[in-house]
Image (spheres, rainbow, N blue to C red):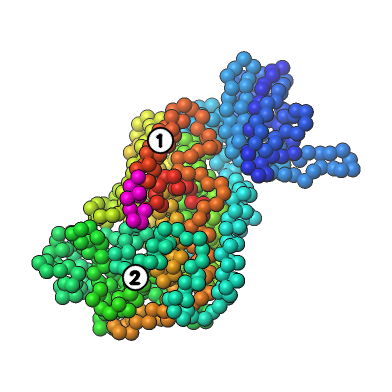
Amino acid sequence: MSEYRVRVATGSFLGSGTWDKVSVSLVGAAGESPALRLDNFGKDFRRGAEEDFEVTAPQDVGEVLLLRVHKAPLVLPRPLGPLAPDAWFCRWFQVTPPGGAPLHFPCYQWLEGEDSLVLRPGAAKVIWQDSHPLLLAQRQAEIKERQQKYRWSEFFPGIPRCLDAENLKELDPNLRYSVSKEVAQKSLLVYPNIALALKALLTSQRPWRSLDEIQQTFIFPKSPTSEYTFEHWQEDAFFAYQFLNGSNPVLIRRCRCLPENFPVTDAMVAPVLGPGTSLQAELESGSLYLVDHAILSGLHPRAIDGQPQFTAAPLTLLYQCPDGTLLPLAIQLLQMPGPDNPIFLPSDTADDWLLAKTWVRHSDFLVHEMFTHLLLTHFEVETFSLSLLRQLPMCHPIFKLLLPHFRYTFHINILARTGLFAPGKLIDQTVSLGRVGCLELMAKGLETVTYRSLCLPHQLADRDVHDLCQYYYRDDALQIWAAIESFVSDIVGIYYPDDSAVSRDSELQAWVMENFQEGFLSRVSSGVPSALDSCTGLIEYLTMIIFNCSAQHSAVNSGQFEFSAWMPNTPTTMRLPPPAAKGQADLVASLPKVNTTCHALVLFWGVSHETEDTRRLGTYPDQHFTEEAPKQSIVAFQSRLAQISHDIQERNQGLVLPYTYLDPAVVENSVTV
């Protein structure tokens, strides 16, 4: 007979506790105990509780290697019968053997109905560190079970593959929003829907009559940025500023040579450049920048409410003035130059120039929303997450490192696929390309993705934007990248002593290969690795993933409403074609109709505001790592992020328009909205 003490921690959020019966089996080097019921007087496994139980095994199982957990519905005396099975969220177990030290078993999982699972002590182990047959068999069994449970599916040809779940009902409870978050997320949309409905705007299919009338939709709680946008949206400096610190700060690049299809001349830009210089001189000095929306060429818009919509594929030339201000120099709305595709200039009439800039803002919305945001953060991150579940066991250090950064991503992506992208739903109702065109844009975008473009320092270097003034996205992103890289380097150094340790981690290699195959469709030209053979390569790979599902998502998601609350700054569709000549501008007639505007605003409001149950970058309340070394690395990471946050907040005090989206105090650990 051997007596063991078992301590159990239940989750603290709504619905975590259970009335069901819980028992454990101790699996050791000398055998396995029968199921041992955990039962004290009164109700056990209460929400937020940590409870102790004494259990007696008929024999000593030796060193405890595994813990089998069993949950079954509570059976009441007849005629009441069994209670309906309920869910239980277990945080962790702690098992203290006779005369031994406590063993900690992280769990952080839901068990629903009659369910069971196998847990290991918390120390992270790479596969080549496991030698006991029981532990090796457990790793293999866990991965096999997960591969059967989590399967791949294709949502649309040419974009990353996704989880095979058609709706939230099919989603594993461990991948869903918490009850509090789900309720809060739904509640967030109540106010704007009611407010716009009371004004009879949500169902109105008529065009806007004037810019003044559009102010009727400017009824949401305001912020300094949304107010600033409303007041300055027509100004050239603010138009250019949004390429640096708006929702899509990743397209602008230095222009050393004008594209052949963009025939800008000295005479065109002289009014902005001023005397004593020329177009060629500014190209050579590096003061000119280009934003090219060529990816939109060849895509076909759809009708909304039976009326055709239109898109463009503009080129925008910008100039960094000697004082550091960035200004637009020239805009061509279509890729092929010609007499019916004029180059618009700041010296044109105010109406012509404003309409040209508005067309660029619409094009930037399409590329931002479908490529920079949904494809590169939401859908690629789902690939990394799904392959993690399928290829790495819970005890793997990379699983422990990355799992918090994939929290709730499946839930929000299924909402996108079943809501935004369902035929006739929000995308079809509000976006010029419609759902099919938007998905085709993602597929085109994936063909252009390279590994360098996913790694921030390389992406910035390739765009040659190191000396662009007032580029706060670049400055803050680089600081966060460096902090993540340092943290990841610590973790990799703990578990991988040399390059060969990376090469011979078969589970890691299977994960990397599956990411390459399912997330990048085995496109070798992307440069995305299909295998890793060094610690340096692994550190960069993991840093890239954590950065893109936390800081990068915050940068391209959190400002959507603030830059779009005033619709003319970010129209989601255009109802007239790009002007074929100057002097034909009709901005208001080109903008989305009333109901289209309002549906888009509700969406932007919902995705730009956080709700309950958020976890900031570097916050790990679920303690998957139990060893002291990774715990110290987490503390160091948090300290560095706190310093970055302090520096950003101090800088922002001196800015007319503060840049807040990459303040670690507001960046979430994962893609959750």
Position of 18 relative to 382 (above/below): above
Magenta stretch in the rendered image: 650-658
Q: Which residue is mark 2?
A: 234
Q: Residue furthest left?
A: 276
Residue at x-position 50% and y-position 55%? 609
- 113 or 586: nearer the viewer: 586
Magenta stretch encompasses residue 317: no
Task: Specify the amino acid type for callout 1.
Answer: Ser
Q: CA distance from mark 1 to mark 2?
A: 41 Å
Q: Residue at x 64, y 17 (%)?
A: 98
Task: Give the residue at x 40% y 40%.
Answer: 641
x 75%, y 29%: residue: 39
Instruction: Answer with left or right where residue 650 lies relative to residue 17.
Output: left
Q: Which residue is mark 1?
A: 639
Question: What amino acid is labelled 2 in the image?
Answer: Gln
SS class of the residue under badge 1?
A: helix
Residue 105 seen anywhere in this rendered image of the structure: yes
Tell me if mark 2 has few (under 14), some (14-19) or many (20+) residues whose alpha carbon lies within 10 angstroms of its own. some
Q: Can residue 410 be seen from the camera position used here?
A: no
From this view, report whether residue 641 is shown above or below residue 662. above
Residue 191: where, in percent of width, then height? 58, 62
